[in-house]
Amino acid sequence: MIKKVNVKTIQKYKDNKEKFSVLTAYDYSTAKYLDEAGIDIILIGDSLAMVALGYETTLSIGMNEMSIFTGAVARGVQRAMVVTDMPFLSYHTDISSAVKNCGEMIKLGANAVKIEGFSEYILDVIKRLVETGIPVMGHLGFTPQFLNTLGGYKIQGKTQEAADEILRQAQQLEKAGVFSIVLEMVPDKSAKYITENLRVPTISCGAGRYCDAQVLVSDDVFGKFSDFKPKFARKYGDMKSLICDCAKQFNEDVKSGKFPSEDEIF
């Protein structure tokens, strides 16, 4: 029987100083392959708004879309922990609707949810979710859902004062009950300082080498999404070329009569 990754597994990685991996997935087959590859956490990121649905930002995606992708990913996973990004306005209005929306993702097969940002209200939401039995991953530093108030895609925590503030927020999230915290677009040394002063694991999204884990968007890793490439993303493959080459060959074979062959007909 396959042993499922859970919140205790993730904490044990931190305690034992073992790194762990996080990748996004948005469909059943990709999730299945990432799981088979040994990825520890599979995140249904709201980044799918851009890489899968063609929106300009993550702000455009809603509960209906996230629900469809969450169910698809969860059905493809056996070992990895499945975490769903809660979309913009799904937990911002009141605690009751936040719990209901997060609970829907758990019912669809997610093992935890991710919530962006920091405020007294968000702390209350996290506390209520954890009391309800819903594990929560926090997200600090650059928070895409706050893009308009942050004034664009800007690195966070560049000064000691700014790093201290992120640490203060992270410690409050930890106290509220999060099992891990994503640090996005935070300088390497600031993320190290924050990580060393937290009990729960940190997950780097462009936050350098010293976090307890690393997360990337799978479409960046595979070389599938080509509209833009974040500085911190490493391209491990070239799926764009593979897909284009396969489609061109199919197109040529159809038009020349090479497809279907004798072996491909009834």
Image (cartoon, rainbow, N blue to C red):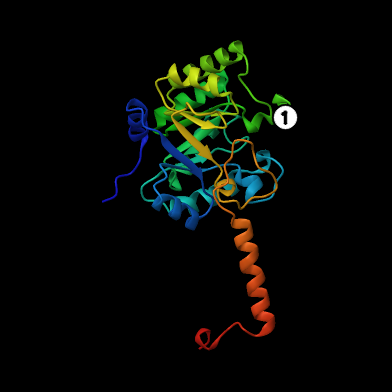
Horizontal placement of 252 versus 29: left or right?
right
Name the residue at 65% across, 80% down: 254
Say whether residue 130 is left or right of residue 253. Answer: left
- The quarter holding residue 75 reads bottom left
Amino acid type of the residue that numbered disc 1 sits on in the rendered structure: Gly
Question: Residue 109's spot in the image, x, y percent?
Answer: 43, 47
x, y (%) of residue 21? 44, 39
Residue 32 position by quadrant: bottom left
- Asked if 52 appears above or below 190 in the picture, the reply is below
Q: Is residue 5 visible?
A: yes
Identity of the residue drawn at 60% across and 10% down: 161
* Label 1: few (<14), some (14–19) or many (≥20) C-alpha neighbours in 10 Å: few
Asked if residue 63 is positioned above or below residue 134 in the image, the reply reads: below
Residue occupying the point 41% across, 36% down: 20
Nearer-the-camera pick, 101 or 21:
21
Mark 1 — residue?
A: 152
